[in-house]
Amino acid sequence: MSLFIQGVGAVSPLGPNATTTWAQLLAGNEAPRKTLPNGMNGREYYYVPVPEKFIAEAGRQPRLRRSGALSLMGAAAAYDALADAGFQPDAQLGARCAVIYAICSGGVNYTRRFYHELITQGVNAASPMLFPETVYNAPASHLAALLKLDGESYTLVGDCAVGLSALHFAAQLLVNQPQLEVCVVVGTEEADWILSDAFNSWRMVTRHSDFEVFGKPQGTIFGEGAAAIVLGRTNGIPVARSGPGLSFFSRQDALAAARQVIEPMIQGEVPDCVICSANGTFVDQIEERVLRALLPTTLVYSYKPALGEALGASALFQTVFAALALRHQTIPGTRHGGHRLPCLTRASRTMKLHRALVTVIGFNQQVNSLLLGNS
Amino acid sequence: MKEKQRVLITGFGIVSPIGNGAGENLAGLRAGRDGVSPVTAFDVSETRCKTAGQVNDEPLKAVFPANRRTKRLHRSSRMVAASLAEAMSMAGSPIPELVVFSTSVGAMSNGEEFYRAVLKSRSRRLIAQWVANYMPQKPILDALELLDLRLPMQVISNACSSGTNSIGHAFNLIRDGLNSCVICGGYDPLSELVFVGFDSLQASTPEKIRPFDLHRSGLVLGEGSAVLILESEESVQKRKATAYAEISGYGVSTDTYHLTQPNPSGIGPRLSMERALQSAGSDSVDYVNAHGTATLYNDATEGIAISQLLPGIPVSSTKSMMGHALGAAGAIEAVFCVLALRDRFLPPNIHFREPDPTWKFEVVANQSCPASIRTVLSNSFGFGGTNASLLFGAI
């Protein structure tokens, strides 16, 4: 069955929608950083926030009035993608669409606050208002309510690769469920100092304000945001190939797993560009080696130095940017690109783009890939 | 697309508060064993509810030889690995292509340990380990690694319907010819944060869990893991495997009434059950393994829906014996349904005292009973209004 990306949407640190974000990336801009202090010891981490004004509109929905940024950004990105696809969010749409969410850290703000109240003030202080929003599928539930859905709503969890897993899940649903016209696939991620502190303990987060990709891996900076795709059976950017990805059990094992996933995606045909997942960590080394081996001359772009590593949203951000690159026949330049990968884009350029490959090596043992365009 | 395939269950494994392995669980179901006990994993002195269905960890440690790798495993990983090993062994030599698994809590206790360490400025020696193992997919990856299975994986987290969703999605993939063998199931361990969360919502009870009782007062949490090996009939025939039951229908609905409360009309559960029957092309059901959490709201809406759709049907909630295992519940209850079909009995709804006169079905009260059942409907409903139902058939 042929599947198409009918619409793309985003809320990012650089814009309240995909169009603005894309224009900013093409202009070579990167989003401002802020610092997040560890609430216990004051240790500070840089992160790339989404300005509150970008999600103010979503926050006016009665259903979302108690929700955190995670749900607000997800809903705003989904509405942006639906508008891009020409859909009005109404009951008619709710009867013929499914919602699939990609989640990594989930409602980490509310979870941390709830647990903090619990262990510092006792169980009687733990707020029942916070607890429901800690559940992984809370954002999907809110969007389903806004779209008046009565059918399929799923939340998938995983690492940075979960967005592509969700997209493939949506493709499976469109094959299985003839009554479905479209799937709205959303990835969303909010920042919290606990995440930065945790990943810093794991040596994945840098204490600097910038990070370089395909250089010496020194850690990443987390970013917030949400990205959304409307996937349907007609009209739009063709999804040439998608898959469920693969797991790897050690870093040594990751290269073989990445090859095993990416080779069947390209099937000997060289894509015109790669939108990669490089984020300044060990991921870059694996991705560099696999791209050098399989696609030594293909242009590669990483959005993450500009917007930060948005974990659960990141693979769908990559997919949104791959679709926009094909739509506009333009690819941005990578900010803070190292010199280990010669084909990394250094400045925006306009060129013929027929096929774009998305590659993701996750922090936590998952790899996946996706090919857009005419195969 | 290929023509619709029959979907058979060729292996299953289970770790639950009423036993480790299918044999112990079968004996527990038949005996109406109460697997709920005082919580020992964390301090419950200030919570209203003080009990939960808890898995016995000791036998799990013997499933895989002790070495540097297995010593560091989280108990969730042990639960998943034990149930996966049992299912794979029962299925013979299946050739799975995909894992569709579920969780709601994940390995939350790693996150709890991490936060306590940060709060108390404790040694950071174990922090990286807690962080790496905090991810909800990690216990599944650990289990796959222990069994040397390198497979693609999709992990569904639809709150309490997750387990049924994972099996249902795997069922759809095989029925429509996209896959021929899929490992599916779910896990969830007990977690302090989630335990207190349900306590704060006053959804959990300090008393016994009494699903569908007129005087029910709330749920008790549980934990565990269950795995099913689903195969197309073609694959089963090709490798001459034994099938223990089949799955013939799967239905879902989304109830957008409220994040934590179902629509009181019962429309959510009713739609998911109707859709499972439509998917199977059948209206024949001999027994319902209900979601039956024993909360006022859940049982009221599920009771209305079952009464409207399947009046007179025998119904039980096996959560009465082991508590509510959240993201694992649907998978554990699926194994219970397979055992009921294979061994021809109705699992009991224990601690049951007084029926609610508004409902038009028969609660399998307190004792299991022999029954020549051919079809079983299993329900799971969750936070966020996710409802899912599966229809199982005897072989």
Image: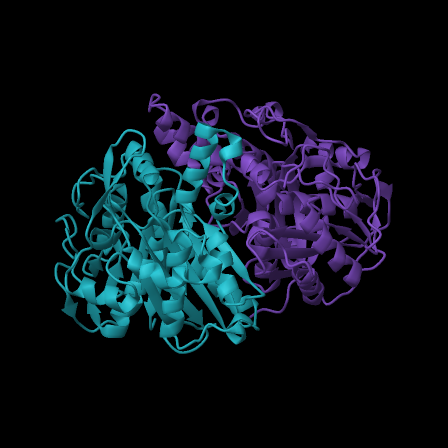
Q: Is residue A268 visible?
A: no
Q: Is residue A40 left or right of residue B189?
A: left
Quadrant where the N terminus of chain B is found in the figure: bottom right
Colour scheme of this structure image? by chain
Where in the figure is residue B268, as x and y percent of width and height? Answer: 65, 60
- Rendered view: A2 above or below B205: below
Q: Residue A2's spot in the image, x, y percent? A: 44, 73
Residue A163 lies, with reference to residue B105, above or below; the image says below
Q: Say which residue appears at 56% left-offset and 66% top-offset.
A: A176
Please give the name of the residue rendered at 67% of the width and 36% of the height, measured from the top-left corner: B205
Judging by colour alone, the chain drawn in purple in this rendered image is: B
Quarter of the image for residue B46 reads top right
Q: Is residue B68 left or right of residue A43?
A: right
Q: Position of residue A358 (x, y in %)?
A: 31, 59
Which residue does the image show at 40% across and 65% down from the upper left?
A78
Residue B238 appears in the rendering: yes
Chain with cyan colouring: A
Q: Is residue B52 above or below residue B330?
A: above
The image quadrant that residue A149 belongs to is bottom right
| Quarter of the rendering containing residue B64 | top right
Between B311 and B62, the residue placed more toward the observer is: B311
Q: How many marks?
A: 0
Residue at the location (58% across, 69% down)?
B2
